[in-house]
Image (spheres, rainbow, N blue to C red):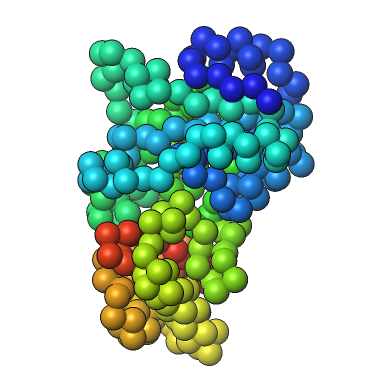
Amino acid sequence: MRVVRTRAALRAALADAARPIGLVPTMGWLHEGHLSLIERARLDDASVVVSIFVNPRQFGETTDFTRYPRNEARDLEICATAGVDLVFAPSVEEVYPVGFDTTVSVGGIARPLEGAARPGHFEGVATVVAILFSLVGAERAYFGTKDAQQVRVIRRMALDLALPTEVVPCPTIREADGLAMSSRNARLSPAARAAAPVIRRALLEAHRLWEEGERSGAQLRAAMRTTLASEPLARVEYVSVADDATLAELEVVDRPALLSLAVRFDEVRLIDNEPLP
């Protein structure tokens, strides 16, 4: 496995890489969810590239950026064991050189939910992913569907900017108690970690009601809030029952929809979702 840290070294390493290339963009602190993306890329592609970069432009809160867990040596060991061919681990200055003054802004799909709760977040995501797509030139890039809106934003960006990299969504990987795997989970206190599976229970309760015939968006949102209220440590930011394609809130669930929510435990913000086919 090769590790490169500059744009020039990345281009040189990719010059003789076997194609097709699969890209797995990460912010490090790798877990089983990331490994599932690497495994999928390993199946689909001749070469697998993993990027490790904690992107400051997608963090609205400076403290959230500084507290984001990091352990590059551990991540590189995991990548080597998983059969990754190339790791791109640049500095902030390498990704955003002196004078950098461009932002990629995606339209309607980026405005609700995470876009409303975290102003500027998706501009930061779209900008760094556009840079990575351009630098790596991969045939495919892999993203977990825990970040369902992010997948939609990146897919829209790639389509609109005619970027040839195919965006491949992959299933959410969960802990045994249903909590979606996330690098942020490492920051949960023991009490918060014990409480956090209420997120999954809330989504499943709304899904159960939908399966039983409930089609009122308001009732499904209320069911999620009621379940979340059973956990004193949970501070709800939003619950959503939205059109699966546009993420516009639904009053009547008469089409494919997405249940999603954002909840804080102490200072750790977690998101999750569940599709309604």
Residue at 44% from the left image edge and 29% from the top image edge: 130
Identify whether 59 is placed above or below 113.
Answer: above
Quarter of the image holding residue 167? top right
The percent coordinates of residue 86 (x first, y second) are 64, 25
Would residue 184 appear left or right of 11 to someone viewing this image? left
Identify whether 242 is placed above or below 112.
Answer: below
Residue at 48% from the left image edge and 55% from the top image edge: 182
Would residue 272 appear left or right of 120 to someone viewing this image? right
What is the residue that sits farthest to the bottom in this orientation?
212
Is residue 68 or residue 257 the one in the foreground?
Answer: 68
Q: Quadrant of the N terminus?
A: top right
Is residue 275 or residue 178 the one in the foreground?
Answer: 178
The percent coordinates of residue 55 (x first, y second) are 37, 35
Quarter of the image holding residue 87? top right
Residue 252 visible in image: no
Residue at 38% from the left image edge and 62% from the top image edge: 188
Residue 5 visible in image: yes
Would residue 251 appear left or right of 212 to someone viewing this image? left
Quarter of the image holding residue 129? top left
Residue at 24% from the left image edge and 45% from the top image edge: 63
The percent coordinates of residue 185 (x first, y second) are 44, 58
The percent coordinates of residue 58 (x first, y second) are 32, 40
Q: Quadrant of the C terminus?
A: bottom right
Report the number of discs.
Answer: 0
Identify whether 192 is placed above or below 16.
Answer: below
Identify whether 256 is placed above or below 39.
Answer: below
Is residue 51 or residue 74 the one in the foreground?
Answer: 74
